Image (cartoon, grey):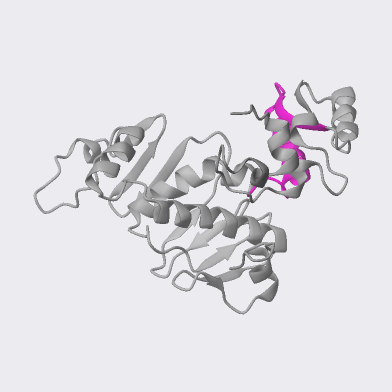
Amino acid sequence: MKDVTRRTLLRYGAAGVATTIALPTIVPSRVLGAKGSVAPSNQIAIGQVGFGWIGGSHLSTLLNRKEVRYVAACDVNGGKLEEVRRKIEAKYGEDRPGGGFADMGAHHFDIAQWALDMDHSGPTKIYPPDGKERQRVRFEYANGIIMNHVGGNCLGLTFHGSDGVLYVGRDGLWTKPDSIAKEPIGANDTRLYESNDHHGNWIDCMRSRKRCVADVEIGARSATICHLGNIACELGEELHWDPAEQRFIGNERAEKLSSRSMRSPWHT
C-alpha cells in the first residue's frame, strides 16, 4: 500500500485513494485554501496576553490578516477581555457555528431543556438584548416559562420556582432554602435517566440499542437554541419559532439565516 500524506489527500480528494481509505468528501472550500482563503494548516495561531492601548492596536491589525487566527486571549481586566472576545467572535463568527454562545451555551441550555421537559421541543419566542431590561438574549416557551441568558463567568443554571431557588452547574448544586436539596426523592417524584459517565453510556447504548442520555436529537434541540439566540441578536428583533416544524414564523430574513446554501446534490 502506498503511503498517502494528509496534504496529498486534501489536494486530490478522497477519490484518488478510495481503495485505501474511505471518508466523507464534503470539505469546506476554505479548508483547501480556495477563493483567496488560507488553509488552516497554513495559518499562524495567535494567543495574546494584554489588550491595552498597544495590545489593542495589535488585535485590530492582526484580525484583518487572513494568514493568522486568534485562538486564545488573556487580560487581567475582565471587561476588556469580554470586549476582545466579542471582537474575535464577530470576526470569525462566519466560520464558527455560533461562536462562544454555541460553545458552552449548548451544554447549559441542554440542562435547561431537560429540566423543562422540552428535550423534543423548544422556545416559541426569542428576544434580543435591548440594553435596558434585557442585557442578553431571552427565550420564552409556549407554557409561559422564561429563560434568560445572563453570561459572565456562570458555570451553570439557576431555576426560580414558587418554593425556592435551585442552582445546578459544573461547580456544584445548591438550593434556597437548603432543605430543598436535602429532601428525599419520593416514590411519585420524577426520576431521571441516570448516567455518570458520558463515554460509558455511549458505549453501553451501542450494545443495548437504548438511547443515550444525551441522544443526537436532544443535542440538536439544544444546539438550535444557541442558533436561535444568535439569529435574534444579529437581526435585533423579536422572533417567533415553531419548534414542531422547526421554522421561523413570518420572518423570511430569519429563515434564511437558519441554514446555509449547500453544494449539489446536497439539499435540505
As drawn, is 1 to the left or to the right of 235?
left
Q: Quadrant of residue 99?
A: top right
Residue 79 in sight from this viewpoint: no
* Res 194 visible: yes
Q: Is residue 27 left or right of residue 240?
A: right
Viewer-proximal residue among 44 and 87 = 44
Extreme residue in the bottom direction:
250
Q: Quadrant of the N terminus?
A: top right
- For the record, the magenta segment spans 68-97
Whether residue 132 sits left or right of residue 142 in the image: it is right
Asked if 211 appears above or below 264 in the picture, the reply is above
Residue 42 drawn at (x, y percent): 80, 30
Magenta-drawn stretch contains 168: no
Figure disc tally: 0
Position in image of residue 98 (x %, y %): 63, 49
In the image, is residue 91 part of the stretch drawn in magenta? yes
Q: Position of residue 258 (x, y in %)?
A: 62, 64
Q: Quadrant of the C terminus?
A: bottom right
Residue at point 62%, 79% (across, down): 250
* 118 and 155: which is toward the camera: 118
Quarter where residue 126 is shown: bottom right
Residue at left offset 60%, top offset 69%: 239
In the image, farthest residue toward the left = 187
Looking at the image, the residue that sits furthest to the front is: 1
x, y (%) of residue 61?
91, 33
Above or below, comparing residue 115 to residue 241 in the picture:
above
On the picture, is 65 further left or further right than 213?
right
* Residue under the point 29% across and 33% down: 196
Rendered position, 85 above or below 29 = above
Residue 29 versus residue 5 in the image, above or below? below
